[in-house]
Amino acid sequence: MATKINNNSRKHLANAIRALSMDAVDKANSGHPGMPLGMADIAEVLWNDYLKYNPNNPNWANRDRFVLSNGHGSMLLYSLLHLTGYDLSLDEIKNFRQLHSKTPGHPESHVTKGVETTTGPLGQGLSNGVGMAIAEKTLAAQFNKKDIEIINHHTYVFTGDGCLMEGISHEVCSLAGTLKLNKLIVFYDDNGISIDGKVDGWFTDDTAKRFESYNWNVINNVDGHSSEELIKSLEKALQSKNKPTLICCKTKIGFGSPNKEGKESSHGAPLGDKETKLTKKEIGWDYGSFEIPKDVYESWDKKEKGSNLEDEWNNNFKIYKERYPKDAYEFERRISSELKDNWILKSQEYIKACNEKKENIATRKASQNAIEAYAKILPEMIGGSADLAASNLTMWSGSKDIKEFFDGNYINYGVREFGMSAIMNGISSYKGFIPYGGTFLTFSDYAKNAIRMSAIMSLKNIFVFTHDSIGLGEDGPTHQAIEHINSLRDIPNTTVIRPCDTIEAAIAWKYAIENNYGPTCLILSRQNCEFQERTNEQIALSNKGAYVLKDAKNLDVILIATGSEVGITMNAAKELEREGINTRVVSMLSTEIFEKQNDDYKEEVLPAKIKNRISIEAGSTSFWYKYVGLNGDTIGIDSFGESAPGGELLKYFGFTQKNIIDRVKLMLKK
Amino acid sequence: MATKINNNSRKHLANAIRALSMDAVDKANSGHPGMPLGMADIAEVLWNDYLKYNPNNPNWANRDRFVLSNGHGSMLLYSLLHLTGYDLSLDEIKNFRQLHSKTPGHPESHVTKGVETTTGPLGQGLSNGVGMAIAEKTLAAQFNKKDIEIINHHTYVFTGDGCLMEGISHEVCSLAGTLKLNKLIVFYDDNGISIDGKVDGWFTDDTAKRFESYNWNVINNVDGHSSEELIKSLEKALQSKNKPTLICCKTKIGFGSPNKEGKESSHGAPLGDKETKLTKKEIGWDYGSFEIPKDVYESWDKKEKGSNLEDEWNNNFKIYKERYPKDAYEFERRISSELKDNWILKSQEYIKACNEKKENIATRKASQNAIEAYAKILPEMIGGSADLAASNLTMWSGSKDIKEFFDGNYINYGVREFGMSAIMNGISSYKGFIPYGGTFLTFSDYAKNAIRMSAIMSLKNIFVFTHDSIGLGEDGPTHQAIEHINSLRDIPNTTVIRPCDTIEAAIAWKYAIENNYGPTCLILSRQNCEFQERTNEQIALSNKGAYVLKDAKNLDVILIATGSEVGITMNAAKELEREGINTRVVSMLSTEIFEKQNDDYKEEVLPAKIKNRISIEAGSTSFWYKYVGLNGDTIGIDSFGESAPGGELLKYFGFTQKNIIDRVKLMLKK
């Protein structure tokens, strides 16, 4: 497979990456040159000879995926994109790390074409890669036919010591081995250096052995600066039939720098003019700053090769389309992230059915019913749970484990909340799937930064967080979420929805599935929730994030409640009404969606002149002052929970009809 | 070492654990019987023959530490504490999982004597154990003498599949191997079952090999129901000279239950009356509910043995005290968590010196200076960073790496934020140390649940979070904290301090060191911050969490600022004053400390009648409505950041003198 580039010219091509990286970091006076200098030779072999991609179309469905998990080495990737012919100009390279350039400090998928996933927070790129490999395997199984294949490619990941020290690398690589993701090929940049210096002071793992223990195919002791050895390793990796491959490459960080090679000083700071010059001399790169000779550009250019590759695939797809028109149509729908034509109708019918059934069930159960209804319509839904399927209720009658059935739609993630979430980011980035995954709300903590990454990348991910408050009962404070709902609400570009019953749960799931601009977190109760009667207008308004569930004339007070607290709030309001206190109840299932409404609607729901407001939510209160103001009151919980039956706890912490009534009266007295 | 208990009587003693566990879970109608049934034989051998402890004094300094990392099996531990003679009555066992009992759903160290650390969130107990083993090794090296030892004991951990799937297990076990913690002995409950069923669907690691790759001493294929094999394994483990030990025990979850043994159905739900009776019959336990025969109690009782062990140690310590009176005094001070006598005076002197120096430096640098000043006084300070020492500035001139110097005071944690934080929890639980550890504020996400656990346990931990906003610049949105400060503020029992200059940084560190009631998070800038002039009274008031840094008569507006935004706010206020707008600036370094002040002081700082209020903090705004109300304004950032030089970004996002002035004028116009 390798083209005939001799080793010297290969070094020369790799040096183009090195030169661009040094120059860009120097010019920005900020950045990480060490890794691009160290991994340039690996990148050169991979991107010139093995990786299948088309610079003209970064979205070609059957391209190989490439992930730079050690994202601080972003200049390596930018150099590759620039040199091979992606839409990334030399001016952009010169603008490295400047405001609104296409070359931010760490690779960002929503900024730069050709960047598959946003990386930087260590370990997560590797996890995204596992997600992509899962997506590839599953999509292939769902669409390939005995006589013709449309999906068949590899996922390549660059990773460093940092990624491999992070716990998440354990979670996802263990799962990758279990799932036998043989088309995942990971290069380990084993340079012995991390930010604090030589890693043998804090990282002495036998990494090869570790990955063997995960059932990986390990190719050890590869000279990361020898193209021959790299080619040999890649050829071996491509033969792997049922194991992912780790290629452990011995490299020198800051390769070529006379004074910084092999040292942490090359990691995160510019080499500086002088050292850059010395390095260029050392590696035999005799050109000016940002200067790339024409023949080097020509050798790197992959526009034609890429177009040919894609053309070939397009021809193949044409045949597929002729033989399997329905599948081809469905494939195109899936990878372009369109919902089914009947989606709107069917989902509305489901909501109507919920309104007729009037079930008093836990919102986690209502969520499961919604999954059952929607996943039947949308085969792109790929579920899972971090070893809590029977508690999160993430399975439905059509769930098929992808380990047993390659064309399945359910992933047993194991006790790996962070790994699950970062894998979901990889699956979602891949396209063709809507991933959803569950754990207890408290353990959203474990996954926090992956949820954030999902939001940075505007990915369609659905996080199913059940057991959302002290209402879960006996498991006690370690399992009872307090600050978590607000903590998720505060992540930019993240939609948090806490439905109060079956109707709102159905609407929440519908919103999550239709939300193209970032992740949705569903916050669900363990305990049963009373069904709330609504008019059709109210059902429609619940799509606005907050709406008046119960109203009165000449308002004395507004009660703002969410989720499992809506039921008691409604009961309290009815009692208050009997006592002549005019009470409005606002069900605020999602503050983010509410904030997107126009000012008129917001004023309609929460009129500025009504200052008597109380929020009721079994979580921390700080967030609610935004809606109740300095004169308002909050019923919430700002301490840790306790271990006791859930009903008892809710009483103990004041989530009772009586307490709401007392607090209203106290407020009105003031 | 093993006493002469024959295997039959051993089984009988183990069955006492089983019986109590089944009865308690049945009575609570909630809980996890599977693990106690499965690990009872291991617990029996360990607690009867090997573990050194004194039920009369759970705080004896040289006791072995025992951690139940699979904390859902809490009834195992409660049974052991009850049977061996700790202050845990049968009534408490009967009250399992009830409000305010001493037997909550998961073990909680602040509730139950003899529980070393609060567990339940998987993987963290194991990490606490690594922390305890580090503490033991370091404390021993600091205090033991060639002729006499006062600290020399083991740390034992029970762990299950869940803990070993979690990423944090990788982080801490890798580090434990690197640090050669030979006195750490971990029992792996290899029962092949997790909540979702047989683990071979999602967890197929060769765990023995994995731990060998971490340089552990692995004892594999031990029958966890054979006392002989367990004894042999323990004898081997105790011989380990430079490696921690993992004993992989094949066990049956729900051991003895005719219908649930080996099945996930025994994991998290009561066996139920009928199955419990069948199980008791199967294991040959012919007693009533909660009935423990006298001879079984007698065999289990360790009060006398424990007292003897401690007496022996006390006698030894007496000799130590005679030979090394100063060290003995210091040892007693350390393990009783008393600060040094000269602490108050010296720390106040340091704050005075800061006030004279008037340095314009980054608060991360100011933090380093504070560490330098305080760590000289307090040798119990044990620092570290997750591979960002030179960025977090957590090292000082006296820092000594514990890997090189066993009596050191600095831990190179590697890129392991979660592991670091959970290890700190273990060190802090151990007593004798004040751990502090650093990472970037954004990556507090990775450690979130360990910070929470620190707060649940009220541990004295100091988290050093630097690079606290978009002000860090070029690394871009993945590295720029937005929601994190508020997210930490919302964790109950956690103190967050964001100092604005050298004085407030010195005060922040002083508070953190003196705070006996939970963790403190220090939020520190990468960029330089202007020194603020203060009167002595103002310096004193800054201990109250918020204070008036600049005042005016007939107030028009109050500006509330924190950290790096105090400087521009002060400049804006001065300009506003020149323009005739009477402006007060409140520096609110810690909202939690401010909330602890009396109402008079709060009213003094933020008079209710002044409704014109603007908060200025380079983070998410939702939290600030609590202080500015519905009529107030917030200057913050609710989107993700960008990659560009920090100064430019601060301007771009509106953190400028001009924007503050404009927003004040706009507010006053309304």
Image (cartoon, coloured by chain):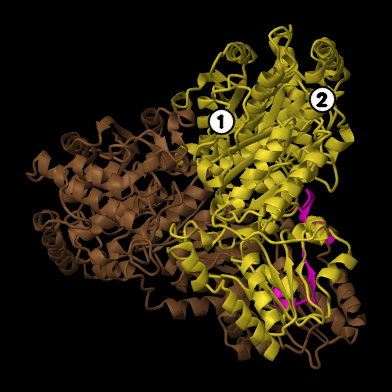
Chain colours: A yellow, B brown
Q: Is residue B176 above or below residue B21?
A: above
Tell me the chain of label 2.
Answer: A
Q: Is residue B635 magenta?
A: yes
Residue shown at 39%/52% (left/top)?
A: B128
Mark 1 lies on a secondary structure that is loop
Whichever of labels 2 and 1 marks the residue nearer the N terminus, that label is 1
Number of the label disc, if any, that sits on residue A332: 2
Which residue does the image show at 15% across and 67% down from the upper left? B318
- Left-right relation of B313 to A668: left
Say what secondary structure mark 2 lies in.
helix
Between residue A539 and residue B655, name the one nearer to us. A539
* Residue B520 showing in the rendered view: yes
Numbered range of the magenta stretch: B625-651
Which one is nearer the viewer's eye here, B361 or B186?
Answer: B186
Q: Residues within 10 Å of mark 2 (few under 14, many from 20)?
A: some
Residue that label 1 marks = A191
Horizontal side of residue A350 vs B193, given as left or right: right
In this rendering, is residue B407 above or below A235? below
Label 2 to label 1, Cα distance in Å? Answer: 42 Å
